[in-house]
Amino acid sequence: MVAVSDGIAIDASPETVFEYLDEPANHRTITPSITGISNIEPLDNGGKELDFTYRMVAVEVEGHLVQTVHEPPTCHRFEMEGGLSGELTFDIEATDDGSWVTYTAEYTIPGQVIAKVIEPFVRRYNQGELQSTLANLKAKIEGA
């Protein structure tokens, strides 16, 4: 299992950050490796389920997300199935100056042997992707 996590301070209320992250199209805007989002359906818990395409290095991975936690204004959590399986979480905390957003991704890479060989590379790649996503989130919200 690969697990990466990072956080960033954003000069906006938790409600503003939560609402921005609640729109699937915004994830494509802030996450450099997402190349497609489709088949978005609302869920009874207020969240969404959707299909996505993610480019990991030079390989496109198809997947499906189901939002298991939709708790305004503190948490978005998604179960991920498909080419990668695991969980993605955005935790949002109020601070004196706005919000602290922690983005955590935990997932498995298919294939035991190939997974062991590429896991360190994938971990570094996705740590960079996570940091870029958080920086883009901050820029989009604070620039709005």
Image: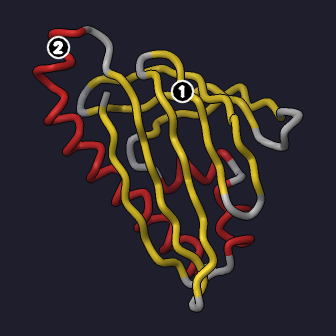
**Vertical relation: 111 (above or below) 62:** above
Task: Farthest residue to the bottom: give it.
Answer: 96
Q: In which quarter of the image is the C terminus?
A: bottom right
Q: Where is residue 50 in the image (x, y as percent from the top left)?
A: 67, 29
For image coordinates 52% across by 78% down, the residue present is: 10
For image coordinates 21% across by 18% down, the residue present is: 115
Q: Which colour scheme is used?
A: secondary structure
Q: Residue 80 carries which label?
A: 1
**Pointer 2 local density, CA inside 10 Å: few below 14, some 14–19, many at least 20:** few
Q: SS for tag 1?
A: strand
The amino acid sitting under disc 1 is: Met
Q: Position of residue 72 (x, y in %)?
A: 77, 59
Q: Position of residue 78 (x, y in %)?
A: 60, 36
For image coordinates 77% across by 41% down, the residue present is: 47
Say whether residue 59 is left or right of residue 10.
Answer: left
**Vertical relation: 112 (above or below) 63:** above
Q: Quadrant of the N terminus?
A: top left
Q: Quadrant of residue 52?
A: top right
Q: What is the C-alpha distance between the residues marked 1 and 2?
A: 20 Å
The amino acid sitting under disc 2 is: Ile
| Marks 1 and 2, the one that precedes in the sequence | 1
Q: Name the residue under label 2.
A: 114
**Pointer 1 local density, CA inside 10 Å: few below 14, some 14–19, many at least 20:** many
**Is residue 39 or residue 14 the one in the foreground?**
14
